[in-house]
Amino acid sequence: MSAQDLVREAQDHMEKSLDATKRELSGLRTGKASAGLLDTVKVDYYGTHMPLKQIANVSAPEARLLTVQPFDKGAGAAIEKAIRDSGLGLNPQSSDGGIIRIPLPTLTEDRRKELAKVLRGMVEHGRVAVRNIRHHTNDHLKQLEKEGTITEDEHKREAKRVQDMTDAHIKKLDDLLKVKEAEIMEV
């Protein structure tokens, strides 16, 4: 594997870490309704645990309301149970048309601070993943230099590229943190 291949692979892994962190943050509850809030909910549907979005449409018609419309009306009870048991603190309510309405209660100040702490932990986890990718790539670059596959100059140049990518991805994570924290603390 060449040094350029290693750097491209590191770029790809860092992008995947960033995307994974974004997905994780989308499940974190803020003051306003977001369909992504229910992405982590798994429903026991005919004996298998399926993601909610595979068996229902989730939408946010209002700032403090989510609606879930099951593809199969018989799945309504299982969906309600899964949402109640999800640990998100939500209480779904059924209606006659098969649509499940989920009003979002306002967050207390203590809960906001607690969520902000969880948020910072999730982003730090993303930062650590990006740094681990940098470390792993730099180790491989050192190994290529020892084997004589690349020169010392190539090693330094590629290591600088990896560091620049690391800095850029950590900045993106910090920006995500600022935006999401502002959403959480907004009353």
Image (cartoon, rainbow, N blue to C red):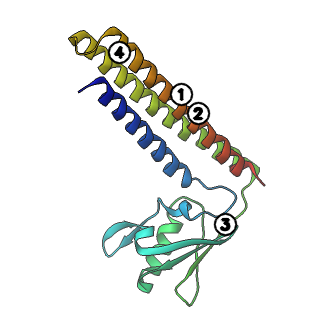
Pointer 3: what residue?
104
**Are there few (<14), some (14-19), or many (20+) residues within 10 Å of tag 3?**
some
Query: Which residue is located at x 52 percent, y 86 percent?
Result: 98
Q: Secondary structure at mark 4?
A: helix
| Of pointers 3 and 1, the one earlier in the residue sequence | 3
Q: The residue under label 3 is which amino acid type? A: Leu
Q: CA distance from mark 4 to mark 2?
A: 26 Å
Determine contact: label 2, label 3, CB under 8 Å: no
Residue sticking out furthest to the bottom:
96
Residue sticking out furthest to the right:
187
Q: The residue under label 2 is which amino acid type? A: Lys
Q: With respect to residue 132, does 40 lie above or below?
A: below
Q: Nearer the viewer, mark 4 or mark 3?
A: 4
**Are there few (<14), some (14-19), or many (20+) residues within 10 Å of tag 1?**
some
Determine contact: label 3, label 1, CB under 8 Å: no
Instruction: Work out whether residue 154 or residue 174 is closer to the camera in this orientation and state it.
Output: 154
| Of pointers 4 and 1, the one earlier in the residue sequence | 4
Query: Which residue is located at x 34 percent, y 34 percent?
Result: 9
Instruction: Work out whether residue 109 or residue 54 is closer to the camera in this orientation and state it.
Output: 54
Pointer 1: what residue?
167
Pointer 2: what residue?
171
Pointer 4: what residue?
154
Q: The residue under label 1 is which amino acid type? A: Asp
Q: CA distance from mark 3 to mark 1?
A: 37 Å
Q: With respect to residue 61, does 185 lie above or below?
A: above
User: How many numbered discs sit on the rendered protein?
Assistant: 4
Q: CA distance from mark 1 to mark 2?
A: 6 Å
Q: The residue under label 4 is which amino acid type? A: Glu
